[in-house]
Image: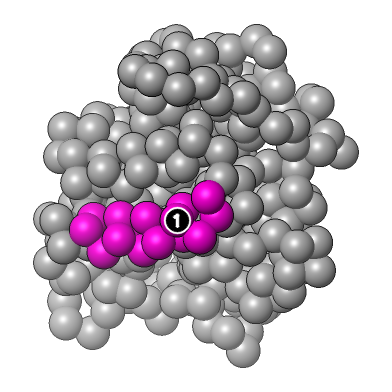
Amino acid sequence: MTRDPGRDVSRRQFLIGAGTASVSSLALAGCTEQSGTTTTGGSSLSGEFKMTGSSTVYPLAVEVINQFEAENPDVTIPINRTGSGGGFSNHFCLGNSVINNASRPITDSEQDQCSQNDVTPHEIKVASDAVTVIVNNDNDWVECMTVEQLAEIWREDGAQTWSDVDSSWPDEPINRFGAARTSGTFDYFKETIVGEETNHTSDYSATERDNEILAGVQRDKYAIGYFGFAYYADNQDTVNAVSIDNGDGCVEPSLENARTGEYQPLSRPLFTYVAESALERDEVAEFCRFFAEESTNQELVADTVGYVPNTEEEKERELEELDSAIESAQ
């Protein structure tokens, strides 16, 4: 299978590029996951297994896959950005992918769907994120917004113009760019900003591709969008990030503010889920161990990708639980 071309270019290129995440994605839907083969000794792991899920976790997963495949050249891991929910419902819980990345925990309904197909997910926390609200560089009226103001913009039947939110702001339409409903980022933003009892507006450009959100805000003075911090971190000169006031003053999105818990309510954990039955395959088990090990890698997680690494305590807990699942599977 052809290697994902996004993994052979710079991170900036694949984050802002408009191409598909993986040339294998066309064959992903409806294709049952095939068993890999594993030989013994040295770095002789071999096989192929598919990864789907969150576009937020995607850049971190790509970097981890690159490193793992460099050390294990006979292992191939095609990856496709489907959104957290899209990955669970259309691929992982149907047995069509072995691993699904997610920017929020798996839901009860997704657990039920997996169970109906004899798929038991094992959760691994791989990093933390700061969901970032962005506006156009020519926007000179917004530097900080309250949670209530954000909710007014993003709820159903909410503000239509900027002046609806604050009378001192322009009487111009708000043009919104955000995550698709299959995205974990959508679920998290709706829960923490819009509220569980209120609908997220349908009057926005929805996409699984964060580079499209970025491009939409870049070209429109009256636009607003939201996505994971990594996509802002790599494009800080092209858009402005909005600080969030959760009642204790304005706090800018940053790795440090996410790490300390000051950036609320938009700090969140990021996950990957592996089908427990697949852990009987050595190449899958060793990749999952590798992902957990790399979750504390400051250079990889923070400097290269732009997320908050796990603590050593978190890593050890994830590895302990993973090893127990591997032992049960094998």
Give the magenta part as a residue range.
315-330
Which residue is painted at 56% across and 45% down in the image? Answer: 280
Residue 26 in sight: yes
Residue located farthest toward the bottom when viewing the structure as drawn = 197
Secondary structure predominantly adopted by residues drawn in magenta: helix
Residue 216 in sight: no
Residue 324 drawn in magenta: yes
6 sits left or right of 168 in the view: right
284 sits left or right of 118 in the view: left
Q: Amino acid at mark 1?
A: Glu
Quarter-of-image position of residue 202: bottom right
At which x and y percent is residue 254?
A: 19, 52
Residue located farthest toward the right when viewing the structure as drawn = 30
Quarter-of-image position of residue 131: bottom left
Question: Where 116 sits versus 99, above or below?
Answer: below
At which x and y percent is residue 126?
A: 34, 51
Q: State the SS at label 1.
A: helix
166 sits left or right of 312 in the view: right
Dot 1 crowding, Cα within 10 Å, few <14, some 14–19, many 20+: few
